Image (cartoon, rainbow, N blue to C red):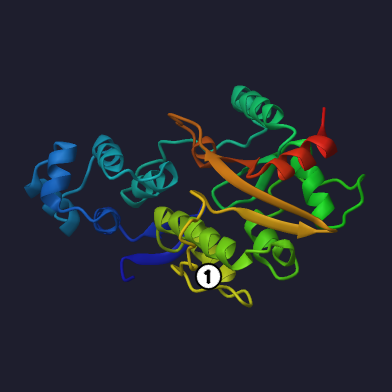
Amino acid sequence: MDDIDGRAGGGAGYFKDFASALRYWRTRRGISQLRLSTDSGVSQRHLSFLESGRSQPSRDLILKLGIALDVPLRQRNAMLLAAGFAPAYQERKLSDPELASVMQALEFMLRQQAPFPALVVDRLWNLVMFNEPAAGMMKWLLAMPSEAAIPRDGSINVLRLMLGPDGLRPRLLNWEAVCADSLLWIQREAMADGPGSEATALLAELSALPGMPAIGHLPDLERRALPFLPLRIAHEGVRLNLFTTITTLGTPHDVTVHELRLESFFPADAASADWFRERFAR
């Protein structure tokens, strides 16, 4: 970790210089300088000079290498900053007028998912949008009053809410398997975010929760297991079997848009489907 100065800005780890950033991401992706040279069209000799600090990159070269290494937009900005350039990608708030069309698209998808739950989270799984069935299910599971408001400002972290022993975990029949799978999700985010990031800190926090399985732990799989990990919920005499899908927005050029995740919940059996239709019918 000698290449990292420990500061954090916008959730991304800061590197001491561009050479450190390039070495980190090439190593993280597990590719050789020769492979990166082929993928990026930059000579291996020049890549070697860049990684040793003997050559300094141009702004366009940094962006080219960021694309070749599939570096997330937030971290491409960090690479630019490490080389002394201004960020290339904006990070707008969802309330920004320029994101109005994105909001409309997300709201449309959330409505279409009813009567089944759906929610929108950022890269750290902070809740920013949800449909009425998602709100209703959350209030039911947490014994919240029906008139209670659920904030949409990112102050609720879905993973903390689900995995904490005082949250939804007691309602999950297969909580250990769900916890292990969720840790893998946030571990991928931490690896993509890079060192010194908020995702890395969140992973450490969640891993330290009482009873959490070790990172990378895989629960025993039945011989005739389902083709997905079900979310098995039991509460007030009701049993629900669900699975989820994750949707991202294509070709994003904004950090916020790039990091949004739409999680949709689907019933895994007819009884669960009937329960949602009866409770959240339009």
Q: Is residue 84 above or below residue 14?
A: above
Residues 138 and 45: in front is: 138
The location of residue 258, given as percent across then percent down, is 49, 38
Q: Quadrant of residue 73?
A: top left
- Numbered marks: total: 1
User: Residue type at mark 1?
Assistant: Ala
Is 61 placed left or right of 76 in the picture? left
Q: Quadrant of the N terminus?
A: bottom left
Is 178 placed left or right of 280 in the picture? left
Is 53 placed left or right of 89 in the picture? left
Q: In the image, what residue occupies the spot 75% across and 69% down?
A: 166
For the residue carrying disc 1, how many other residues have a C-alpha within 10 Å: few (<14), some (14-19), or many (20+)?
Answer: some
Q: In the image, what residue occupies the spot 57% across and 53% down?
A: 124
Helix or strand or loop: what does disc 1 sit on?
helix
Furthest toward the left, the residue is: 45
Quickly name the residue at label 1.
204
Is 271 placed left or right of 256 in the picture? right
The location of residue 26, given as percent across then percent down, is 24, 53
Q: Quadrant of the C terminus?
A: top right
